[in-house]
Amino acid sequence: MSTHLEPIRLPANQPPQFYRGGDAIAALRGATGTDSKFGPEDWVGSVTTMFGQDTNGLTKLPSGVWLRDAVRENAEAWLGAEHVAKLGDSTGLLVKLLDAGQRLPVHFHPSNAFAKQHFDSHFGKAEAWIVIGTYGDDPRVYPGFKETLSKDTVAEWTREQDTPSMLGALNSVSVQAGDTVYIPAGLPHAIGEGVFVVELQQPTDFSLTIEWRDFLASPEKGHLGLGFDTALDALDTSGWDAERLTTIVTHTADDKDTSVDLLAAGSDEFFRADRVQLTGSSLALDPSFAVLVVLDGAGTLRTEHGGEFSLAKGETYVVPFDAGQVEASGTLTAIRCRPPAPEKR
């Protein structure tokens, strides 16, 4: 009898960060007695390390094996042959729970081409935010410059650490649960205090941070050793007016379908995300590597090989391709995160 890989429930994985947050993650997971002040990110199903570090950020499976190593040793079973043919033995995906207990600094991420040239990486870092909760008086995000700027202007703000000018130049968008924001590579952005998201990213930790003072220990940690003059070559300084913003910001709270495609058009060459929402019903899900985040309710995940796994609020699972077609059932809401489809890569 052949053995197949099955879904694995994952423990929390909260590497230390420079900013406050984490209470919303603890509440979702039902954790108590934890110091969540600086645990604002939970890296779920991660094969990615924090920049310049050996293992911080990696997911350790309950067996004690790093997920990265398990995937490398059996890539086609974990990812599927078509995925491996295009992306090798990387999952092609980094999923985080991110709870901004304070506003994050203004930063941006490199494209695939820039990352290949400067970091010797196949992946840059496009990302997307799925807002799953908010708190405080005025939860906001800041995607893209409102008007086109010159690189020289941004370079001066960076030299002077002129935060009011940086933040004032960005769009300021009020958000609520069900909103999603796609952040293409190069787009300057920040997440405001009180925004809780499931974040999908390409599997790197390349953050170029122009607002480093009061957040990072040194400007070098802002430009990742490149120097800001080089780093700013990766920045999108074009203007994003209200009409252009509609191409990256979507509102899905009122969509009651059992499966809702959450992300803006064009993002599917980097990742996919669906909200599964069941009310005493079931939904078949095609074979795929996936990260599952259960937001509410309870149910069951069954695989075509006879595996059966309970789903409950706050649980996170990594689902291998080899699990085959799976069926979710019950009364629950979950986010299913996946790499790009092979034909999109």
Image (cartoon, helix red, strand yellow):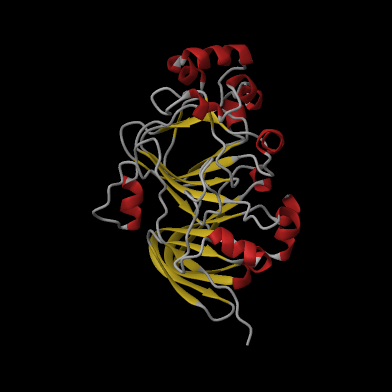
In the figure, residue 236 lies in which quadrant? top right
Q: Nearer the viewer, residue 212 or 181?
A: 212
**x and y percentages locating residue 146 in the rendered image:** 56, 20
Q: Nearer the viewer, residue 237 or 45?
A: 45
Residue furthest bottom in the image: 1
Residue at the extreme left of the image, as rendered? 33
- The correct choice, above or below, for 308 with respect to 268 in the image is below
Q: Tell me where residue 155 sits by quadrant.
A: top right
Left-right relation of 300 to 285: left
- The residue at the far front in this view is 54
Q: Position of residue 251 (x, y in %)?
A: 51, 42
Would you say 124 lies left or right of 168 here?
right
Q: Looking at this view, is 12 or 180 the one in front?
A: 12
> What is the x, y in percent for residue 34?
27, 51
Q: Is residue 207 left or right of residue 113?
A: left
> Quick check: 217 left or right of 327?
left
Residue 288 appears anywhere in the view: no
Q: Residue at left 59%, top 77%? A: 304
Image coordinates for residue 268, horizontal then vertical, percent: 66, 47
Image quadrant in which the N terminus is located? bottom right
Observer able to see residue 39: yes
Residue at the location (52% across, 26% down)? 220
Question: Residue shown at 71%/34% (left/top)?
Answer: 117
Q: In the picture shown, does residue 317 fall above or below 189?
A: below
How many discs appear?
Answer: 0
